[in-house]
Amino acid sequence: MLAADPPSDAASPVYHTPLAGEAGSTNFHGYSIALPATDRAHQTALTLGGTLLLPRQGRTTGVPIAAGYFRHYWEDSRTRDVVSIFVNDLEYDRRIVGPLEVVGRLENYTLPGTQTELAENREVTASTVSYGSASFSLGPGVRLPVAPLEVDNDLKVQLLGTVGYFYAARSHETNPELLLPPNTLSYGTKLRVRYDALRRNLLELPHYGFAAGCDADYQVRAEWQELGTRLNPGPVNRDYLQVSGYLFAAGPVPGLSEKNRLVASAYGGTTYHNRGDRFNAYRLNGGPLSGEAEDIARPHYTGMVYDDILVSNYAILSAGYRRELCFFIYLTLAGTYLWADRANALDDGRVQFRETTSVAGTASLDLAFFGNSSFNLGYVWDSGAVRNGRSGSGVSFTWNKLF
């Protein structure tokens, strides 16, 4: 059992957790350690790792992890980019006057190979399809700094026009009667709101404060058709509106020292008028608990280890406890409840959304290492959403190197 730290006497200063970017010093087993200040406005990092799923998710035993992260803030411009070749999220913002700026975003989800949906943790090969999308967004934005005035603390409101391209193709396993959408251009409008007032610790984990945001996305697919099969065609969801939002908070544990933190989050999203399909569905993902400003906005289900499940509507509630074992090692325990309309494959290859609920638990260890790097080791358990009807667990390991 983790106990509260003994109270400090008058001669012993109250301990404070080292915070991201701050210079300072701390003691470790009697040794004084200097912590240099770091420039959080300019960060380039590489993440490598992998996951293991027990039992498998369909036929997937594990998933490799590799991504580059770039965050550079200058006086009149900013960029934040996550690059993993097949899945990328790039943004560049240029200040025009005062808080007004022009925002450009480029996103793509173009995994090589095919994607197959599950039924009771069984891959339904008739649903196997190769598909992906890429989009470019451009429009005005407003950015206002907020307390505690770190580089990632701001209120951002962006109204973007988007244009994209979608493609789909069969494989030799696809049901010949399955109806696929045509390759098509898409266009629409997206509203993005982000508010971040979090202060982060030495490992960039949220220490206190809160963050919130929402997205409203209206899209029209220029060419579209019925999905389903020739015998059981479905509706033509040529246009659709999706709205999502989140809240995230971190703070103290009453009566305990600063080494103890509580974290909580809530995520939700809906596709209006049931116009969700497997090609516009939300992708719920997992991995280490969120800390970086834009990563917090990603709907995070702690029962997953870097893989996606497709949902048309969802609500996620999560609460956790973090303990600072020493100034560079943090243990986090968290539990999550998920309600979602989850993608479910039928034997003829059609994908429908079925209401499901699930609970999950995770234990995660974050530690700093030599060479300006850090490790995350995580264990997760899920009661059934990840494998679409079967409980299971998984482990993940990531190494993050800051250059």
Image: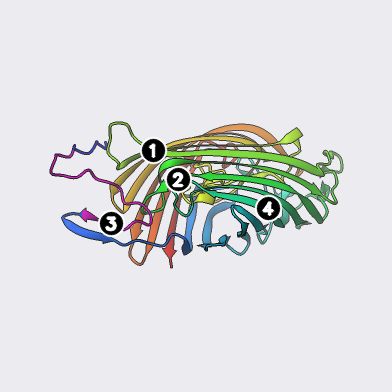
Closer-to-camera residue (51/328):
328
Q: Which residue is mark 4?
A: 140
Q: Could you tell whether 7 is left or right of 192 in the image? A: left
x 79%, y 53%: residue: 186
Closer-to-camera residue (336/52):
336
Tell me the SS state at disc 1.
strand
Q: Which residue is mark 1?
A: 251
Distance between the alpha carbons at the discs numbered 1 and 4: 34 Å
Tell me the SS state at disc 3.
strand
The earlier-in-sequence mark between 3 and 4 is 3
Distance between the alpha carbons at the discs numbered 1 and 2: 16 Å
Q: Which residue is mark 3?
A: 24
Distance between the alpha carbons at the discs numbered 4 and 2: 23 Å
Residue 300 colored in magenta in the image: no
Which residue occupies the extreme front position in the image? Answer: 98
Coloring scheme used? rainbow
Front: mark 2 or 3 = 2
- Specify few, some or many for label 1: CA neighbours under 10 Å numbering under 14, 14-19, or 20 or more: some
Residue 179 visible at all: yes
Badge 1 vs badge 2, beta-carbon distance below 8 Å? no
Front: mark 1 or 2 = 2
Front: mark 1 or 3 = 3
The earlier-in-sequence mark between 1 and 3 is 3
The earlier-in-sequence mark between 2 and 3 is 3
The earlier-in-sequence mark between 1 and 2 is 2
Q: Could you tell whether 403 is left or right of 107 in the image? A: left
Tell me the SS state at disc 4.
strand
Q: Which residue is mark 2?
A: 147
- Specify few, some or many for label 2: CA neighbours under 10 Å numbering under 14, 14-19, or 20 or more: few
